[in-house]
Image (cartoon, rainbow, N blue to C red):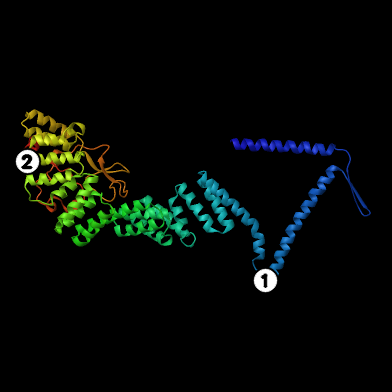
Amino acid sequence: MLWSLVKVIFFIGLAIGLSFGLSFVLETPGGVRIAFGGLEISLAPIGLILSLLFLLTVFWVFLKLSGLMVAVLRFASGDETALTRYWGRKRERRGFDALAESMVALASGESVRAMAQAAKAERLLNRPELTRLLSAQAAEQSGNAPKALEYYKEMLQEDRTRFVGIQGIMKQKLDEGDTEIALKLAEKAFSLRPAHHGNLDTLFLLQSETADWSGARTTLSAKLRAKALPRDVAKRRDAVLSLADAMVAYNAGNKETASEAALQANKLAPTLVPAAVLAARTLIEDDKKRAAAKILKVAWQSMPHPDLATAFAALEPDEKPDARRKRFEQLASLYPVHRETKMLLAELALHEEDFPGARRAIGDLAEETPTTRTLALMAAIERGSGSDEHIVRAILAKALSAGRGDQWVCSACGHAHTEWSPTCHNCKAFDTLEWKQAAETEAEPMDAVLPFIVGATSLVAAKTETEVTAAPEAPPIIIDAEIIDENTR
């Protein structure tokens, strides 16, 4: 609207200016005398202006005719495209003007106009590599996906536009949820341009979603060569991919491959809890307990976790309670102020029926961080200490509605998982699971609280194949089964 007003004002101003100029010339007295040899011409000012315009027109026609004559001479001398090029220059200018109009219309959101101008440019220029992409994008903007797909398929025929055509079709397949075809297209695009950052990201995401860990590792190496991600991030992702390979191999019964991959993952990321657990498990099965203990201690020192305690218990599955408590003190001393350490010591004390020791170990954790696990521990301590039954029941009732504490939570979407996995089950993001408190958690049923650490006969018996590197569905805890039965009855 404003631009239209400016154009109207400019046009009116130009008309007024020309009118005043013409009046000035007409009213100017005198004239112009041109003498050449014996010829003399006298012109009024307006006559001079008209003569100059006429001469300029003649000169322009002369240039055009000269260009035509040159083209005819070239054609006569054997250049068969000379005349075509001469007559096509104007057509080409019109075509590029239409192309520019199409780009502007597309950027402005005028998809119908953009498609019309792109079609005009294609007709005038006959350069489909320039116009098809604009036509496809305009069709997508207008919601005409089938038409856009036609343009993208046509782009596959040209070497210069094949990659863009594949990218366009892949995007449509992703929008449709057809990840299988999208993965094949991403692989084809990778073969055409191995260093394209956007396609590398898409390919890696699709490979991780389909659990193609070997392919994802190849893509990760390509991303590192293309400098598409920092080296430390690549190292961490390589560790996660090695761990994923190890999990698959372990579940398939290929213990040797699983051990090699798990140890590689632990070497790349010593603080990655699932990698440390699986690496320790394979070492325990090979009777390499000292190496397994070392791995678990390094991981615990960085982040105490229930799975690490479970694996540490499996080093000596048949030891007596006092010996186990003494051995676990080595682990607890690495991070004594962490709440996981406090709960671990409280569980060990409960198993020895040292209720005062369990109370000292857990401290004010049940009040500061009231979770199902801390409250269940407190209920067991109160029950063992001889407190009134209503006190125990009150704590258990509070535990039923309390959060479950730390879980594997996706940092991208906030979805909580019962076990660790390389990708988020909700948003499919790779390596986003963190052990932390979820923003919103459901109450954990009391019958899900199971003893995993103290009294576990072996790590193999304590976990199923799908829990190789995952956190248990509920944190490890010791609690009197009678309390649970009475509360859920």
**Is mark 2 in CB contact (under 8 Å) with mark 1?**
no
- Residue type, label 1: Gly
Which picture quadrant has residue 353?
Answer: top left
Indicate the amino acid at tag 2: Glu
Of helix, strand and loop, which one carries label 1?
loop
Across and down, in percent, residue 145 comes to 43, 51
Residue 158 position within the rendered picture, expressed as x and y whole percent measured from the top left: 49, 62
Between residue 26 and residue 367, name the one nearer to us. 367
C-alpha gap between disc 2 and disc 1: 106 Å
In this view of the protein, can residue 380 be seen by the observer? no
Q: Is residue 148 above or below residue 416?
A: below
What residue do we see at 38% from left, 59% from top? 187
Return the x and y of residue 435 as percentages of the image width and height.
25, 43
- Left or right, 45 with respect to 421, comes to right
Would residue 227 be found to the left or right of residue 99 on screen? left
Q: Would you call the spot at circle 1 few (<14 residues within 10 Å), some (14-19), or many (20 or more)?
A: few
Q: Which image quadrant: the N terminus?
A: top right
Identify the residue position indicated by label 1 in the image. Answer: 78
430 or 225, which lies in front?
Answer: 225
Q: What number is the disc on residue 39?
A: none
On-image quarter of the C terminus? top left
Total numbered labels: 2
Q: Earlier in the sequence, mark 2 or mark 1?
A: 1
Q: Quadrant of residue 250?
A: bottom left
**Residue 352 circle label:** 2
Front: mark 2 or 1 = 2
Under circle 2, the secondary element is loop
> Which residue is outermost to the right?
38
Front position in the image: 447 or 460:
460
Q: Residue 303: x and y, percent?
A: 23, 44
Estimate how packed mark 2 is, as few (under 14), some (14 to 19) or many (20 or more) residues with alpha carbons within 10 Å: some
